[in-house]
Each structure stands twice: as C-alpha cells, then as structure tokens.
Image (cartoon, grey):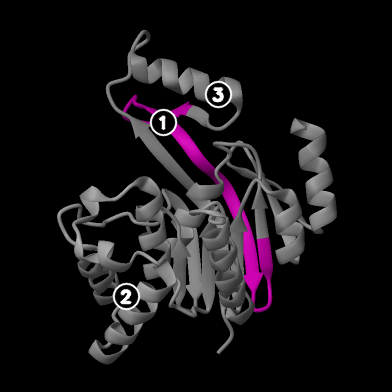
Amino acid sequence: MKSYIKLNHSCLDFPIYEASEFSFRNKISSFGKRIGFAKTDIIKSGRRIVRGLDNINLEINTGDKIAIIGPNGAGKTTLLKLLAGIYVPTSGTVEINGKVSSMIDLGFGFLDDATGYENILLSRIIQGESIKNRQNIIKSAEEFSGLGEYLNLPIRTYSSGMKSRLALSSAIYNVPDILLIDEFFSTGDIEFSKKSRDKITEIMDNSSIMLFASHDLNLVQELCTKAMYIKNGKINFYGNIDKARSIYENDYL
C-alpha cells in the first residue's frame, strides 16, 4: 500500500490566556507579528491566539523527499509536529497513510534519573518494539553512541552533547514509511556528526516519504527532490527546489 500525506485547509492555533493590553503575553504576540512568524487574531471567547499554521493544503506521495525551508518561527517545526501527531489541527483535516517516525525534539521524554540504557529501553518500548528487537537495538545504540560506561549513569550527569548522542542513537533504528526530521546534523563532534549523517541518509533513502526542515539550503538541495517554503505559517511556495530557494533568498537573504 502506498504512503501518502494529505492536509486539507489545516489550521493550528495557540491561545494566549488572559492577555491584556500591557501584558507580557501581549508583548510577545505583538513581537511575533513584527518578525513575521505568527498571525494574531481574536477568537470567540475574546482570547488572543497565535496562528501557528494557516490554511495548509498539501498532498505528498510515495517517493517525495521534501525540504521545508523558511525563517525561524515560520512554522516548519510546527508543521512536522502536526504530522507527527504531537499537535491536532484546530480546523481542517490531516490524513496520513504509513508508519511515521519523527526526529523532532530528540530526547524529549527522557528521564533524568534513569540511566542511558534505561532511557534507550524506554524509547523502544514506546515504539512498540518486541523484546528480541529491543535487545538488538540497545546493543547497536551502545556501539553507535560511543558512550561506553556512561550508559550506566543517570543522564542528569550527562553534558548536552552526550544527551544528544544518546537521543540520536536511540532514534535511528526505525525504517519508517514516512520520516520527519528537524535539523539534526549538528549533533556531537565532527566524527559523530559524519556518522550520524551517513546513518540518517541511509534511513532517508529507505523511507517512502521524507520531510526535512533545515536552514542549510545546500544540504536540502543535496538530499531532497522538492521544497516547501513556509512564511508566516503559510505555504508560500511548494515545488521545484531551486525556485523555492530563490524565492526564500530574495525575501530574507
């Protein structure tokens, strides 16, 4: 069965509670409008909202490798989280066919007082892995991370770089139908970053559909077949990757 993603008039709103004319929340809302990452509006209850995604219409099919580009706060990560099921659309529909794996907020949900090994095991249980597969993946993650004996320690003792290694190593052993990635290649030192890139590129190649949000325009041109330029929570352009890059660069660079 072919994988696909279909979004029909999908919107995602974030309410700002108890906003008043001079409140900090209102200042943040106004600042968001000035830098162009969000649209504010008034909903029926009188509360202000930030519109993270605005009337998204999209169809992605098997074989598509999509770059998502745009400035900070444009809605790139928000769109990926919507597709991952982390967010539910305020209005409109999201239809997905295929197993989804996301590399967004790697390490989210890790338990600080649990060891590296325990956190890897927990992540595999959440993914629904069989007991046999869990053990194989834990061994592979141990080798890939290079953390050695540190895996026996609570991760509250880890540096941020070590946590990144652990998170990526526990996430890369899925081969999904649909792969969602949000900026991942800066993890760890040069050697580990190269190893990570090679492994994730392999997963990309084996996935039916891939969406990759990144600020690295050269990298997305190398890895993707199409591009989506998001601005102010809307799809400003979707199609040829060179044209998308040109429009984006003319707007911001």
**Magenta residue span:** 41-66
Q: Classify the position of the N terminus by image quarter.
A: bottom right
Residue 19 x, y percent position in the rendering: 32, 19
Residue 38 visible (yes or no): yes
First in sequence, mark 1 or 3: give its number.
3
Judge whether 71 appears above or below 5 on screen.
above
Q: Nearer the viewer, mark 1 or mark 3?
A: 3
Judge whether 164 appears above or below 42 on screen.
below
Label 1, on which residue?
A: 49
From the viewer's side, name the closer residue of 35 and 175: 175
Residue 10 x, y percent position in the rendering: 52, 53
Quadrant in which residue 238 is drawn: bottom right
Identified by mark 2, the residue type is Gln
First in sequence, mark 3 or 2: give its number.
3
Judge whether 72 appears above or below 171 on screen.
above
Identified by mark 1, the residue type is Ile
Label 2, on which residue?
A: 127
